[in-house]
Image: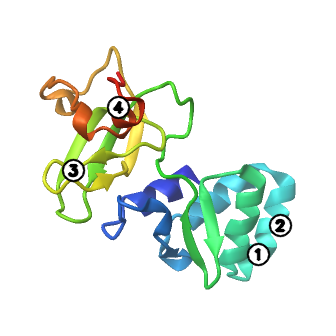
Amino acid sequence: MIEIDLQIRNNKKFDGKSPLTNKFSIEDINILDNIYNICQDDIILKEKMKLIYNNNKFFLFIKNINEQYKNLLIIHPNNKISLKYLTPFQENETHRVFGYFRCSKCKNKWTSSASWKNKWQKCKKCDSMIYPYNQHMLKKNNIDYTENISKLPHDQKRCGKCIEYGTLCC
């Protein structure tokens, strides 16, 4: 389900200002075959999925997986699928993570090593509050050079967590 979550978030039509309002057609999600194959390990779920999947009822297929695995997605009428959480990272709130941002208003892109669970950052060009479309844990030893080109100080005026707590978040 995390793969579907990231596929939705990486879609060019994805709106970082209001992630939960985005609804995509289930038929547009091209990873359903992979999910079906992953489910083969669970014998009971496998039998349920075989009946549903073979009849091409994607709505029921995803709904059953959703109930079984408590994943990140919500199903809507008319075979539409959307996100359940504002950010992809949903683990411990005390961990900052690396985030990738894309402003849907002005198309500005940026990354931040001070990204948090369900927290936004303001775009430097248009001041829109944008949630990250992708996040991953910070790497301490094996740092990717492209993600750490400059070590600029954290921009407290644009960070949702800093603004919320009134102090530096990291």
Give the distance between the C-alpha atoms of the residues marked 3 and 2, in whole angstroms: 45 Å
Sequence order check: which comes first, mark 4 or mark 1? 1
Left or right, 22 with reference to 61: left
| Viewer-side label of 4, 2 | 4
Give the distance between the C-alpha atoms of the residues marked 4 and 1, in whole angstroms: 46 Å
Give the quadrant of the N terminus: bottom right
Task: Give the residue type that dot 3 points to.
Answer: Cys
Left or right, 90 with reference to 166: right
Residue at the spot 22% in from the left edge and 27% down from the top edge = 154
Residue contact between numbered discs 3 and 1, judged by CB atoms under 8 Å = no
Q: Which residue is mark 4?
A: 162
Residue contact between numbered discs 2 and 1, judged by CB atoms under 8 Å = yes
Q: Which residue is mark 3?
A: 123
Task: Give the residue type that dot 4 points to.
Answer: Cys
Give the distance between the C-alpha atoms of the residues marked 4 and 3, in whole angstroms: 15 Å
Q: Which residue is mark 2?
A: 48
Residue contact between numbered discs 4 and 3, judged by CB atoms under 8 Å = no
Q: How many marks can you see?
A: 4
Task: Give the residue type that dot 1 points to.
Answer: Ile
